Image (cartoon, grey):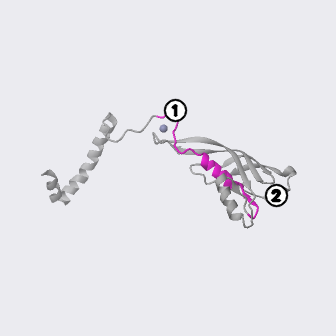
């Protein structure tokens, strides 16, 4: 979703209400990002504010199960006019330091990208499925009944193959026994 500065300038009070809905390439998002945004044009630039939400499919870092989590993100971004003169380069460096986005020279505001960055930033870096997390899965061969049964099954499955290997590589087999 892109809005031009001219479009925003032509609005009453230079303010625009947006119903945002876009399937953004946010990692783990399984639903489009939806929400209401307000764009306000000021002398210094454009304020983008509002609230969006989406649904994430995450993998718990402890029990390794997949789970869903809704994500609500407050959008409060400032896009400032760029100075196109000799001082342009210095100004851009300042902009980076201040964590504000410059308005592109062509005046097109990439609202989708602003929302994408905000949602990505708000996505959890460590995922926990909840308070009822069963904890880490038991490692193989932990010694409980289930894994013992599984080990037996694996042995019986492997038997015929080992027999084949014995006939194919009799030397290797005798080497293992000695
Ligand atoms: Zn968990």
Q: Which residue shows up at 29% across the image and 45% down it?
A: 154
Q: Is residue 31 visible?
A: no
163 vs 120, nearest the viewer: 120
Q: Secondary structure at mark 1?
A: loop
Name the outermost residue toward the top.
Answer: 132
Does the magenta segment cover residue 117? yes
Q: Which mark is residue 7?
A: 2
Residue 143 sits in quarter: top left
Comparing marks 2 and 1, which lies closer to the viewer? 2
Q: Is residue 159 left or right of residue 45?
A: left
Res 5 → quadrant: bottom right
Label 2, secondary structure: give it.
helix
Q: Position of residue 128 (x, y in %)?
A: 51, 39
| Mark 2 burial class by Cα count in 10 Å: few <14, some 14-19, many 20+ | few
Residue that appears at 72% across and 61% down: 104
Q: Residue furthest bottom?
A: 86
The image shows residue 114 at horizontal and vertical percentages of 68, 53
């Amino acid at each position: 979703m892109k809005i031009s500065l001219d479009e925003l300038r032509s609005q009453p009070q230079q303010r625009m209400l947006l119903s945002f809905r876009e399937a953004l390439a946010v990692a783990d998002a399984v639903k489009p990002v939806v929400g209401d945004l307000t764009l306000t044009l000021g002398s210094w630039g454009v304020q983008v504010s509002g609230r969006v939400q989406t649904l994430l499919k995450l993998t718990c870092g402890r029990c390794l199960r997949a789970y869903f989590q809704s994500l609500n993100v407050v959008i409060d971004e400032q896009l400032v006019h760029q100075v196109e003169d000799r001082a342009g380069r210095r100004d851009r460096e300042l902009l980076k330091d201040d964590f504000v986005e410059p308005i592109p020279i062509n005046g097109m505001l990439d609202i989708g990208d602003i929302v994408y960055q905000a949602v990505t930033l708000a996505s959890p870096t460590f995922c926990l499925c909840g308070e009822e997390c069963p904890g880490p899965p038991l490692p193989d061969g932990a010694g409980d009944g289930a894994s013992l049964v599984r080990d037996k099954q694996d042995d019986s499955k492997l038997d015929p193959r080992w027999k084949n290997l014995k006939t194919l590589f009799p030397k290797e087999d005798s080497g293992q026994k000695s």
